[in-house]
Image (tube, rainbow, N blue to C red):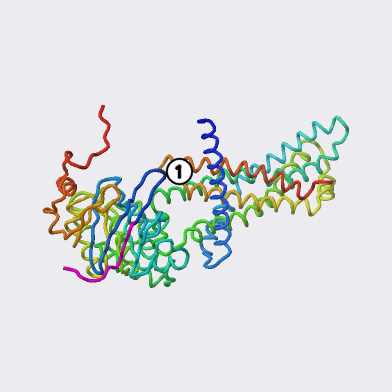
Amino acid sequence: MNTKPAKIEVRGLYKSFGTKKVLNGIDLDVRQEESLVVIGGSGSGKSVLIKTILGLLRPDSGSIKIDGEETAGMSGATRERVLRKFGMLFQGAALFDSLKVWENVAFGLIQGRGMERKRAHQVAIEKLAAVGLGPEVGELRPAELSGGMQKRVALARAIAAEPEILFFDEPTTGLDPIMADVINDLIVASVRRLGGTALSITHDMASARKISDRVAMIYSGKIIWVGPTANIGRSGNDHVDQFIHGRAEGPIKMEVRRA
Amino acid sequence: MEPLATLGRIFIGFLAGTGRLAMFCGAALGNAAMPPIYLRLIGRQMISVGYYSLPVVGLTAVFTGMVLALQSYTGFSRFNAESAIANVVGLSVTRELAPVLAGLMVAGRVGAAMAAEIGTMRVTEQIDALVTLSTNPFKYLVAPRVIAGLVMLPCLVFVADIIGIFGGYIIAIGKLDFNPATYLKNTFDALETIDVVSGLVKAAVFGFVITLMGCYHGYHSRGGAEGVGTATTNAVVSASILILTFNYFITEMFFATK
């Protein structure tokens, strides 16, 4: 069991949009070199949680520490310095459609770190190879790729600068089961190779089981259960049981208006 | 109480929107002035704003000049004042018509495209991706567009001045039997430096307004395709209204007599 200190430490995190409370006092630790997956239903606040940790959204209150440094409310150059520790794979890949694939992968190296284009091109080709894509793919535009290939390119972009922390937002959404498994394998391999810390959010249980050391469940803006992945089947929590078995009946009520 | 509450909400919303726009404007200017400056992106935007707008602005200017000469002739001939046509065309084109019409055309072409492009980047999380890749979206997306608008609109308007006057010349010479040398002499005698400069100052302000509105509405677009469509419409409408508003104030600043 990983007993290393927390890389990411979240305490009492609140975030509302108008009258809707999305994060309602989140407490969560992600330890060094650990892969933690946050599971939860659609609209439970998973994406808001990682965007708030990244600083893309400003929390209403609470504390977010990265390597012991408070980052909630950080802005400007200090925020950019902290962001260099992160790599992120977005749900829809979020590739820049005006750039070639290799330029997407090398973007953070060229724009963020001032690497020379020729050297960045080499690194991009290496990272594409690491996710199973040939150099010829680097010359294509994102619109010419399938969904699975776009996710792989987005993964290559996330790991290009060899970040200490990787975030994965619904990495397998929209993919067929085989391609989803390929992406899961690549995520595991990438996190292991980097020796980094990973925080993922998903509602795909097969993905969660494969890529995580620990699982946390978010419900109504709170973390209601955290434990080792191996223990999720015997969590003793009715919400977790209902979610992992995908049952319509249980304590979690979906807002469905019946005709 | 309900109507009062609605009125209050609208007023607070207006104030919040104005504040958000002012902060966006400050951030755009601040980031445009401070390094790093993306010269390659600025160059690309200059081509998009300037070079690709030339045909539409040129056509607008030439037909406006032609119509102006024709209309002035029908009006002025009633008072035997046909010789003033060159003056009217020259002054109207350089002071008002070239900057305003070029501004409105560029707002429709460039402002809409910017709002759609940045709006799509917003709803597909590409702007969030920029941030996670240690790139400031204001420097990368907004500043190059604003700089391109500021620089290229005066260039476009200068070309439109020449083409607009040429449009009037074509009609005056080809249709109304004016003497070419006299028409040109009258035009240049009537024009003063301030006439052209005021038009170019207007153009720079309009270029800033158009690109700012395109970036602002795109940057704050929400909710998928519908949100991007709304952002595009709002960018063109707000830029057009601001162009007409600023046109009045800049005209007053240059030419108002006490």
Rendering coords of residue B221 (x, y %): 46, 46
- Whether A3 is among the magenta residues is yes
Vertical placement of residue B162 versus B7, above or below: below
Rendering coords of residue B167 (x, y %): 72, 42
Q: Along the horizontal axis of the image, is B215 left or right of A2? A: right
Circle 1 residue: B228
Magenta stretch: give its range: A1-12
Vertical placement of residue B80 versus B45, above or below: above
B235 or B38: nearer the eye? B235
Q: Along the horizontal axis of the image, is A148 left or right of A237? A: right
Q: Along the horizontal axis of the image, is B209 left or right of A122? A: right
Q: Along the horizontal axis of the image, is B163 left or right of B227? A: right
A32 or A73: nearer the eye? A73
- Whether B217 is among the magenta residues is no
For mark 1, give the secondary structure.
Answer: helix
> Quarter of the image containing the C terminus of chain A?
top left
> Quarter of the image containing the N terminus of chain A?
bottom left
B243 or A39: nearer the eye? A39
Residue placed furthest toward the front? B1
Rendering coords of residue B119 (x, y %): 45, 48
Q: Residue at x 72, y 36 (%)?
A: B67
Q: Residue at x 53, y 64 (%)?
A: B39
Q: Amino acid at mark 1?
A: Val
A29 or A130: nearer the eye? A29
